[in-house]
Image (cartoon, rainbow, N blue to C red):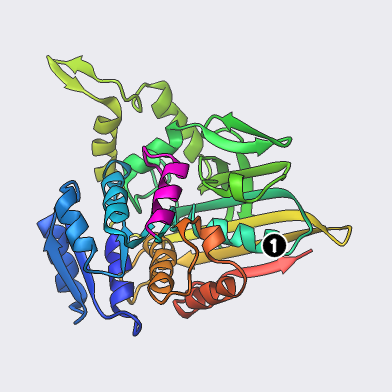
Amino acid sequence: MGSTIARDLARSKHVDQVTVYDVDRDRLRVLAERDRPEKLSTKIHDVRKKNETVKLLKRFDVGVGALPPGLSEYAIAATITAGVDFVDLIFGWRFGQREIHSAAKRKEITIIPACGLAPGLTNILAMAAAERMDRVDEVHIKVGGIPERPKPPLNYRIVFSFESVLEEYSRKARIIKNGKITDVAALSGLETVAFHAPIGKCECFYTDGLSTLIQTIRNAREMDEKTIRWPGHAEQIRTLIDCGLLETEPFLFHGQPIVPRKFASAILSNKLTLGKDKDLTLLRVDVSGKIDGRLVNHRYEMIDHYDTKQRMTSMARTTAFPCSIAAQLLASGEISRKGLVPPELAFKGDLQHKFLDYLASRNMEIRSKST
């Protein structure tokens, strides 16, 4: 995801310089050798070295985080100290929202969290529909990245960190049910969702992807996010859970402590790599409510495919492009709101249209209809 963000930024005529920092020398080498854009450079750096991270951030107009949760916290702390605008793919930090918001406002900077596909694009679309209505009753988000064709095992192929996928399958999901915030088990709420041929029927189930929408779209009676997979996947994952393979507490095996989830992730990662297969991303956002006393439903839908020409997965495209666009609009000053600003609040009014136009220019087609 980080490499795709960097390449998209470097190709923009509005961007002067992009520097990618990572501790993985091989990953940086692959990025540097693949496109060789003039504006892109790479450097070895450990984000946990706060003083160095603060110094390097001060050289730029905007920072972008494509880090796992444990490391993203270091980037957020450094960006507040440095006083630099920042866009992050995740929103799972130890710090409280109020603490970050207050610190960012004092520094007069903007931090946009969870600005990828889901949460991120899904939040922006949900808010775009909600703003058309006098009253929002329900928000239902269904989204997922899957291989073009289901294959064993698990009818799934890895398109981003598999440990993050397993975490989604284990963590309770926050939804709104009957007007109240409720925690439900991940993988529950299983239902069928259909897309036009040749995709057909898939399944979807609750995951914890609403992020900030629970706070920003108020008074909805129902709100949830579900992950889309090929049929049978949820039951296969439940088998792994029932066998204890997703547990996080270590146990001794021949005198050595082993964490079942890490062990399972390592084994399955080799089996589930995308390889020469191609992926696709499915998205559907339904928002229902009232306009002038009339019940309405607004739907956004996207079917995005692997980019053969760029050799780019659909999941990388659909995750990276919203983040890259946010960073560019921050750098240009078009996003001016300060503090911790969720993507659905960063892109409002005319910026919603501009955001969608930028996605369309990258061949991400999002269709909408109202009934």
Tell me what residue is drawn at x 41 percent, y 47 percent: 100
Start-end of magenta stretch? 90-107
User: Which residue occupies the extreme right position in the image?
Assistant: 293
Q: Is residue 239 above or below residue 256?
A: below
Q: Please tell me whether residue 3 belongs to the stretch shown in magenta.
A: no
Q: Residue 195: in sight, yes or no?
A: no
Quarter of the image with the C terminus is bottom right
Q: Residue 231: in sight, yes or no?
A: yes
Q: Is residue 260 above or below residue 115?
A: above
User: Which residue occupies the extreme front position in the image?
Assistant: 106
Tell me what residue is drawn at x 19 percent, y 49 percent: 50
Q: Is residue 245 above or below residue 7?
A: above
Q: How many marks?
A: 1
From the viewer's side, name the closer residue of 214 and 237.
214
Q: Which residue is mark 1?
A: 131
Relative image position of residue 129 (x, y in whole percent): 68, 62
From the viewer's side, name the closer residue of 149 and 114.
114
